[in-house]
Image (tube, rainbow, N blue to C red):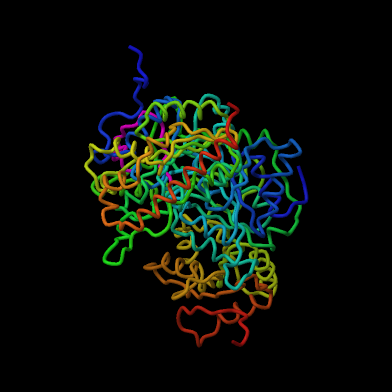
Amino acid sequence: MKHTIPQEEYMERGHMACLGCGGAHAMRYLLKGLGEKTIIALPACCWAVIPGVYPYSCMDIPLQYVAFEVTGAAISGIEAALKAKGKKDGTTVVGWAGDGGTADIGIQALSGAVERGHDVKYVCYDNEAYMNTGIQRSSATPRGAWTTTTPVGSTKAWKQTPKKNIVEIMVAHEIPYTCTASVAYPEDIIRKAVKMKEIEGPCYMQILAPCPTGWKYPPEKTIEIARLATETCIFPIYEVTDGKYKINKRIRDDKKKNIIDYFRTQGRFRKLDETTIQQIQSSVDAEWELLKKKEKCFGEEI
Amino acid sequence: MKMVLSGNEAAAYASMIARAEVIPAYPITPQTKIVEKIADLIADGKFNTQFIKMESEHSAMAAAISASLVGARTFTATSSQGLLLMHEMLHWASGSRTPVVMVNINRAIAPPWNVWADQSDSIAQRDTGWIQFYCESCQEVMDTTIQLYKICEDNDVLLPAMLSEDAFYLSHTSEPVDMPDQDAVDTFLGKFDPPYKLDVENPHSFGSLSMPHQWYMEFRYKIALAMEEARKKIVEVDREYGKIFGRSYGGMLDLYRCDDADIVLVAAGSMSSTIRVVVDELRENGAKVGFARLRVFRPFPAEEFRSLAAKVGTICVLDRSFCFGYEGAFFTEIKAALYGIDNPPLVRGYVIGIGGRDVTRNSLINIINDSNNPEIKGPVDTWVDLKRC
């Protein structure tokens, strides 16, 4: 029998993630693609807790825990030092941060690192809020979501603004490779991890990592909900290689699900009104059409 | 090799002769000549290093820490606002036990904007777990930068260090500087080889979570112990450097004509040269005046001050910074060091040269005369050369 997912494990049992944590899946699959010669810098985020409490760790690879906003700078330093020591060849340097650590407090260091062209791979596991601190909104929280700092209340005070499109911000840096991925599609994560490892230069990957604790759904639904995010086109799976767009999970128009099907699975969207849902549906549709146009205009020759 | 170098150029050449392997840095006045000179040395093929042109000082320090954890000898330089922006990462450097060496140009803090000499920036980093040196000459900048690698990379120390030089008075003043021979520096420093590294062949985690009942407190205690080791190492390295290279700087506290002094001035940085001239002048007139230059602020030379205090009547402490709500930091700390000794000297504090205001011969003479004023009974902090305001 041929396995579609490598059997090797670099993240062992005994981690401290919540039941059903999308972020735990994301790391496990990423490492299966990247392999053991990987150094990870990780800032404040759920993953600063997940590996375990000193002196224990569930990780088989070197880790540097770094300050919240410095992931991009830390991987720049690691990469430069490996070069100085003649140890860069064959080693993959990875920054692994949550969406707040990427799109908010860490965006400067990330932008700096990729602009300088370091051979680093930055992976954002996107659970769409500050989950480790207790579900506060980040700029990557989608419009309409409840969080503890967008508490809905009696005035419809859910998140009012759209999710920051950090993926396109990274594309605008003209780096060799930018992609999205999802824990619903592990083979796709692994393929993209292998691809990033083979590219010399800065790469960015954003993995949708649903969070049962913060999104308010039963832990066994993580993969199902992640898949719905892609099937409704609110989180499309695509990659941009040297400026060329390619949608990896193509959703046919007749198979495309409504955003309400996704929202109904999660308590964080429970109180959304019909008008807002329709507005979000329109913007999801428009974004999806735009992505398809980008693929057509800036895609690979078919 | 003798060259005419500014303090900044001396720092850049020192990073080269010490073979710094990774230099993440961000430009700020008046530090810019350091990064420019390093860029020139690399562009001319004289300096083989990884120079990362960072997007901020905060990121520069973060990159330096990570590079050091890989096992690379690391150098950076900053000043004032840049040092303040780094503050969080300074704690991270000492907590990670990374021997990053940094040159800081002492510059005033805004607002209002002022790019001239003032030690408030580094004094504000007192509690970050960094070894702190203050230099008097461009030669000392060169020699101390080299010494710092030897001190910090010792496995019993493994702490970061900052060397401060006053804005413009030192950073932009050119003096003849002797750059030591490369082979001699290579032998003196050896290779940086920390016991634990970020290394795929031997994976370790650096900085993971530690609970209150576990090891956090012990990690902090280890930093305290390392500072005590640094105290010994600083004196040893300065002595050894003197034997090999012919120059040393008094270890922790650089004493000048203090042996039979009644009044001793204490200061750090570029005003030291002016003070030496005034001491010589007053000595010629028969006054028993001496000078103790605070070369190292962390670890604090408390024992050295207690020895000094046993022999003198009055200590005048000059602070080129001020801790609002209390006193100048040197003044406070020296008094604390002398608590409980028999027959303590009178200790008086003077705030001087803030924002680069010139520290003149006359200011110093006035301070010495003032310290003899019988009407002043106890310790008082005096702001020197203030305009009416």
Specify the quadrant that holds the C terminus of chain A: top right
Q: Which stretch is magenta?
A: A49-66
A55 magenta-colored? yes
Q: Quadrant of residue A199?
A: top right
Percent of width and height locating residue B239: 57, 45
In this rendered view, identify the residue nearer to me: A147 or B80.
Answer: A147
Percent of width and height locating residue B376: 49, 85
Q: Quadrant of residue A46?
A: top left
In this rendered view, identify the residue nearer to me: B251 or B100.
Answer: B100
Whether residue B181 is situated above or below residue A69 in the rendered picture: above
Q: Residue at x 37, y 41 (%)?
A: A232
| Most frequent secondary structure within the magenta stretch | loop
In this rendered view, identify the residue nearer to me: B135 or A33.
Answer: A33
B4 magenta-colored? no
Can residue B130 be seen in this snapshot? yes
- Does residue A12 appear left or right of residue A97 in this picture? left
Percent of width and height locating residue B281: 70, 71
Whether residue B74 is situated above or below residue B292 in the rendered picture: above
Q: Residue at x 35, y 44 (%)?
A: A258
Percent of width and height locating residue B182: 68, 36
- Does residue B52 appear left or right of residue A235 in this picture? right
- Does residue B235 appear left or right of residue B105 in this picture? left
| Residue lying at the far front of the rendered structure | A254
Q: Residue at x 28, y 52 (%)?
A: A268
> How many numbered marks appear?
0
Q: Quadrant of residue A200?
A: top right
Can residue B99 be seen in this snapshot? no
| Residue lying at the far top of the rendered structure | A1
